[in-house]
Amino acid sequence: MSGTFPGRGPAVGVGLRSVHYPHLVTRPKTAVRWFEAISENYMDTEGRPLEVLLTVRRDYPVALHGVSLSVGGVEGPRPGYLERLKRLADRVDPWIVTDHLCFTGAHASNAHDLLPLPYTEEAVERVSDGVARAQDALRRPIALENVSSYLTYRESTMTEWEFLVAVARRAGCGILLDVNNAFVSASNHGFAAEDYLDAVPPELVKQLHLGGYTDMGDFLFDTHSRAPTEPVWALFRRAAARFPAAPVLVEWDEEVPAWPELEAQAVKAAALWEEADALRA
Amino acid sequence: MPSGLEALQRRFVAAIVEGDEAFAAEVTGGGKLTPAGAVGVYRRAYPARLTEALGETFERVWRVLGDEDFFATCAAFVPTRRSASYNLSDYGRDFPEFLESRAELAHAPFLGDLARLEWTFKELFHAADNAGLPAAELARSASSGCRLVFGEATALLALGHRVHAIWRRDLADDSPLEPEVWRGREDLFLHKKDGLVYSRPLTPSEAAALAALRAGRPLDEALAGAEGLDAGTVSSLFHDLAESGAVIAVRT
């Protein structure tokens, strides 16, 4: 597979989380159409996590979603990282490989965080080089996700969405548009999330993410610890109408609920996608 | 001279890891955050992530110490050990030695060994199963001068304290760990089979024989060098070894 989801209709998936392994290995019937696995959780293991992932893969399309490519890092990927990711991708044959438009620290000091980049021409170049290196190593196209941020750099010379689109066009990669992250950053930095979505060309968007944030009072924090909020669902309706070809993923990383509750969020997303599709027709 | 982007990234990382406050001048805070407050969001997330990683690997140590002491220990450890791996679960390799170095934990000197056992378990959990010789083939191939080759998913631990029972006990069991529970040394053999990690306490003579075998010594020499090994013990040890699938080859 190579960056295109197999099948039509509301393709809503969820993140593969260890708390659901016992349920999923029974191969239950579910409305969920695909799964997303965090690449790093499976790159260095031959144990049960990989066994479950390969079991799930027998029945469903799987996306590999990384958090450590550090595509905007000036030092490039850590030694061995791309080789291990390629080995995993070759075993899983994901429908898409994605990571984040960010850097994650320095080789000697990994911050293990999705650190925002300045929106500058130099950063566009840096990321483009990183994408080329990754795509060459993996022999697959990748897509990059917009991250939530809590600060902006004084030296930035373009908006976040201008930066995102410039990177995708220059690097020749796709965009994983996280609707929640767009909302969080819009709220934190005082722009309209609708403007963000409207500025992204549909043909660049390969996947949508949905998740939940936490209102910290002073700012919105991207915790992925709850269901999407109503403003995010509202923004998703807009995204579903604008990016009909993009499969959707419900992300829930902290305080992960029981399977039925997570599945219900996927069903809700599929219903909203259907509504948007009906309006398009 | 570093590029603008390189310098910016270095300073951001320094702000997160070392608390470089000057970096805040480069940014505007989101929401109602001041620049320093915004940098602080990332700075606080850093030790939280590393502490979470330690908690996942050293779950039993956490249980024994309790939340307050475990988090205080992590707060002391994290500033002294950076993470250079892309994989968070690689963090904490020398946490056992750190635990043993802490004066405030002197009342629980077994914690380092408990952590060592937890780290070894994690390593084996993620290892591939040994491609072990079938028991019948091992029995057929083994001769007095042969050398056994062990798979990578095996470990022999020589510990200064008896921690196996503490490691295996129910997480909900918070009965006091009196010195008689952990005092005294302990040898353990761990291996992985069919996706599961198994552990077996060893007598000193069994441990000596296994250590010699794992070091590549010939079978007869390894057994002769282990004091107190009687025929019954040898038979039992070999039965367990054969069943474990830990031996992947026999060299004559």
Image (tube, coloured by chain):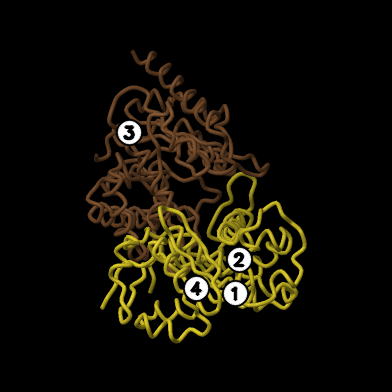
Mark 4 Cα shell of 10 Å, populated few (<14), some (14-19), many (≥20): some
Residue placed most toward the observer, B109 or A171: B109
What is the spatial separation of the Cα atoms under label 2 and label 1, in whole angstroms? 8 Å
Q: Provide the chain ID for the residue under circle 4.
A: B
Disc 1 residue type? Glu
Left of B169 or right of it: where is A21? left
Mark found first going from the N terminus, 1 or 4: 1
Q: Locate residue B42: give its quadrant.
A: bottom right
Number of the label disc, if any, that sits on residue B164: 2
Name the chain under label 3.
Answer: A
Q: Earlier in the sequence, mark 2 or mark 1?
A: 2
Q: Are marks 2 and 3 in contact (CB under 8 Å)?
A: no
As measured in the structure, the alpha-carbon distance from the residue carrying label 1 to the one carrying label 4 is 17 Å
Q: How many marks?
A: 4
What is chain A's hue in the picture?
brown
Q: Position of residue A155 (x, y in %)?
A: 46, 56
Front-most of residues A228 and A119: A228
Give the labeled residue for mark 1.
B186
The amino acid on which the numbered mark 4 sits, given as a three-letter code, is Thr
Name which residue lies at 43% across and 85% down: B224
Residue B38 image offset from top left, x and y in percent? 60, 53
- Cα separation between marks 2 and 4: 21 Å
Q: Are marks 2 and 1 in contact (CB under 8 Å)?
A: yes
Q: Which one is in front, B154 or B126?
A: B154
- Disc 1: CA contacts within 10 A as few (<14), some (14-19) or many (>=20): many
Given this view, does label 1 or label 3 mark the residue nearer the observer?
1
